[in-house]
């Protein structure tokens, strides 16, 4: 069965090459169905980047909301936080 989490991971895989091209990466952490929130980590050059909020909301967030029904928000999990 193809789940919402599968759809989220597939969508992240579509944008991963663009993020990796700039020296970063994106990692799926979890999906909270009750709120429609996807939690991700941005790795590599994305950590501490001045454009991290823009990448999160206007890049990853918009694409996930367009591609995956049920996704309402995307939140960043910092690498020093436990999932």
Image (spheres, grey):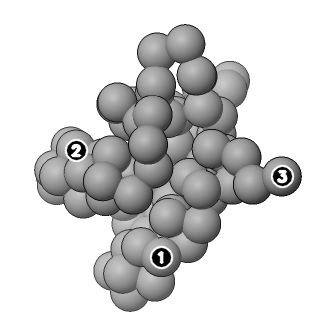
Which dot, 1 or 2, sits closer to the camera? 1
Q: CA distance from mark 2 to mark 3?
A: 29 Å
Q: 66 or 40: nearer the eye?
A: 66
Mark 3: secondary structure: loop
Mark 1: secondary structure: helix
- Is residue 66 found left or right of 26 in the rendered image? left
Residue 32 is at least partly visible in this image: yes
At label 1, counting other C-alpha atoms closer than 10 Å, the crowd grade (few under 14, some 14-19, many 20 or more) is few
Q: Which residue is mark 1?
A: 14
> Could you tell which of marks 3 and 1 lies nearer the N-terminus?
3
Q: Which residue is mark 2?
A: 57
Q: Pointers 3 and 1 in contact (CB under 8 A)?
A: no
> Could you tell which of marks 2 and 3 lies nearer the N-terminus?
3
Which picture quadrant has residue 73? top left
Which residue is at a point 44% across and 43% down the rendered structure image? 69
At label 3, counting other C-alpha atoms closer than 10 Å, the crowd grade (few under 14, some 14-19, many 20 or more) is few
- Name the disc covering residue 1, or none: 3
Which dot, 2 or 3, sits closer to the camera? 3
Mark 2: secondary structure: helix
Which picture quadrant has residue 49? bottom left
Does residue 35 lie above or below 80 as drawn?
A: above
- Is residue 35 found left or right of 74 in the rendered image? right
Which residue is at a point 51% across and 63% down the rendered structure image? 12
Q: Residue 66 placed where, x, y %? A: 30, 53
Q: CA distance from mark 3 to mark 1?
A: 20 Å
């Amino acid at each position: 069965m193809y789940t919402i989490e599968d759809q989220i991971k597939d969508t992240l895989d579509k944008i991963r090459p663009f993020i990796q091209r700039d020296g970063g990466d994106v990692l799926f952490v979890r999906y909270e169905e009750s709120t429609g929130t996807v939690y991700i980590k941005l790795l590599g050059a994305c950590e501490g980047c001045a454009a991290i909020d823009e990448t999160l909301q206007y890049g990853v967030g918009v694409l996930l909301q367009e591609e995956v029904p049920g996704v309402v928000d995307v939140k960043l999990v910092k690498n020093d936080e436990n999932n």
